[in-house]
Amino acid sequence: MSRPVAVVTGASSGIGAATARALAADGFHVVLAARRMERLTALAAEVDGTPVECDVTSPESVEALAGALDGLDVRVLVNNAGGAFGADYVENADIDGWRAMYEVNVLGAVRVTKALLPALVASGAGTVVWVSSTAGLIVYEGGGGYAAAKHAETAVAETMRLELSGRPVRVIEIDPGMVKTDEFSLNRFGGDAEAADKVYEGVAEPLTAEDVADTIAWTVSRPHHVNVDRLVLRPLAQAAQHKVHRVHRSN
């Protein structure tokens, strides 16, 4: 394989799929990792990549992913697999939902990073991208579990950057605000389409998966001595976590 390899987790939809397309366009051979193999296979054919079925919460699955990359020139890891489950107040916290968010957003990303880090170091020009959220920087009502997980992810990224000082691996954190994808809010509200749509109600142009993917690809494509530590992006309509301009149409 002559092209450098970029690994994208959570690549079957949304930001992950868009990132796979963006990195492939930039000349990477993209290894697409996610649980839904049918979607991965179709996308891999589109971008001339390699699909690998992977559940980041499973040690055995992540070990198999690392094995599939043995001997390849792995330059980039995009820790994108994640999600939000529920919007309960802390007093009504669904502990299983909180645990699931921590497992996938934090422990899953750490598990994959740990498995692939030797290859990234060996490449001499490695990059780890953590796709976190503005929820990792500021909290909001109903977001305790998700914000806690994303704050932890931010802490891991910052710690890792310190620990890798002197080794040839960049650590980049991407923190999107309001992004409208087909599945994120739908999954958060247990498939309730009405509740999911309400999140974006009146917002003219929330960010898209492609907007975030373009940002990821830009940070990765900087000269390797340039480390974009953290990049926050929001739609114009979202001035801050609690300040969102909404246009309500009258009947």
Image: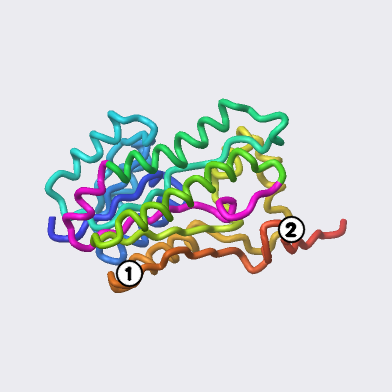
What's the colour scheme? rainbow
Mark 1: secondary structure: loop
Question: Which of label 1 and label 2 is nearer to you?
Answer: 1
For the residue marked with disc 2, what is the amino acid? Answer: Gly
The reply, left or right, for residue 71 in relation to residue 79 is: left
The reply, left or right, for residue 56 in relation to residue 176 is: left
Instruction: Characterize the local packing of mark 1: few (<14), some (14-19) or many (20 or more) Cα atoms within 10 angstroms.
Output: few
The quadrant in which the N terminus is found is: bottom left
For the residue marked with disc 1, what is the amino acid? Answer: Ser
Circle number at residue 149 = none
Residue stretch in magenta: 115-140
Up-down: is 143 above or below 210?
Answer: above
Circle number at residue 221 = 1
The reply, left or right, for residue 36 in relation to residue 185 is: left
Q: Position of residue 54 (x, y in %)?
A: 32, 36
Considering depth in this image, is 233 or 190 the residue closer to the camera?
233
Q: Position of residue 140 (x, y in %)?
A: 69, 48
Q: Which residue is drawn at 87% across and 56% down?
A: 251
Q: Name the residue under label 2.
A: 202
Q: Where is residue 115 in the image (x, y as percent from the top left)?
A: 26, 41
Instruction: Characterize the local packing of mark 2: few (<14), some (14-19) or many (20 or more) Cα atoms within 10 angstroms.
Output: some
Up-down: is 246 above or below 222?
Answer: above
Q: How far apart are marks 1 and 2 (CA)?
A: 35 Å
